[in-house]
Amino acid sequence: EVQLVESGGGLVKPGGSLRLSCGASGFSFTNAWMSWVRQAPGKGLEWIGRIKSKTDYGTTDHTPVKGRFTISRDDSRNTLYLQMNSLKTEDTAVYYCTTISAYSLDFWGQGALVTVSS
Amino acid sequence: VLTQSPGTLSLSPGDRATLSCRASQSVSNRYLAWYQQKPGQAPRLLISGASSRATGIPDRFSGSGSGTDFTLTISRLEPEDFAVYYCQHYDTSLSLSFGGGTKVEIK
């Protein structure tokens, strides 16, 4: 069974940093392309970016607005990361990690809530 | 840009639901997907490649369309189908985008 478990969410002050983790199991993480999606309270889904598998050079693509965010992976730990810097109040959202398969996001974690507030 | 309509659909169990997703320019069917999200839950993939149901998705859900116009149809609404539905386009070279969502609510 595919499982994605996000952790590391919480309350952070504007201008602060936070790193989310996503532990993966039940599939070959090494070969998987992964992504992060967020959802502000009461709003729709917003894609943050993706990271390819190492066999596909492990390159990342981020949306321009997310220049403050960096996606990385540790295949030895089956873990995906989202490093978020210079956080703003508008970054308050639930953050989901997902797998990417056949041009869609086929498995999602339960989400991690990040609240940016003074 | 993906535009979904209507914003809200008020229907009764047993009704047929027709949800629209319109792209600002023509997209390949391969890159069009649909998701369902219930309150407090993560989204779930329903349809990929515009018309292929994901594993475990009941056959009352179907996707169709091409070019700029795509449709998600729920043939007979079950109580558990009342949720928000999102379409998504995957641009292999640049990014991925979602429509604004359609809420299917009980009338």
Image (cartoon, helix red, strand yellow):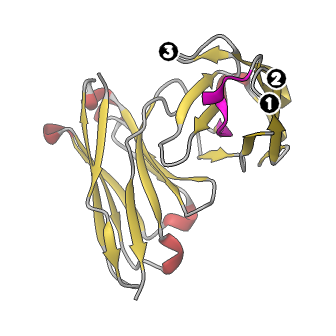
How far apart, in angstroms, are the residues tagged by discs 2 and 3? Answer: 24 Å
Q: Nearer the viewer, residue A26 or A63?
A: A26
Q: Is residue B96 magenta?
A: no
Image quadrant in which the C terminus of chain A is located: bottom left
What whole-number distance in Å separates the C-alpha atoms at marks 3 and 1?
26 Å
A26 vs B37: above or below: above
Residue at the spot of label 2: B15
Q: Which residue is mark 3?
A: B55
Tell me the element at label 3.
loop
| Residue placed most toward the observer, B17 or B13 | B13
- Identify residue type, mark 3: Thr
* Residue to which mark 1 is pinned: B12
Q: Which quarter of the image is occupied by the N terminus of chain A?
A: top left
Mark 1 residue type: Ser
Residue depth check, mark 3 versus mark 1: number of the one nearer the observer: 1
In the rendered image, the residue lying farthest to the top is: B59
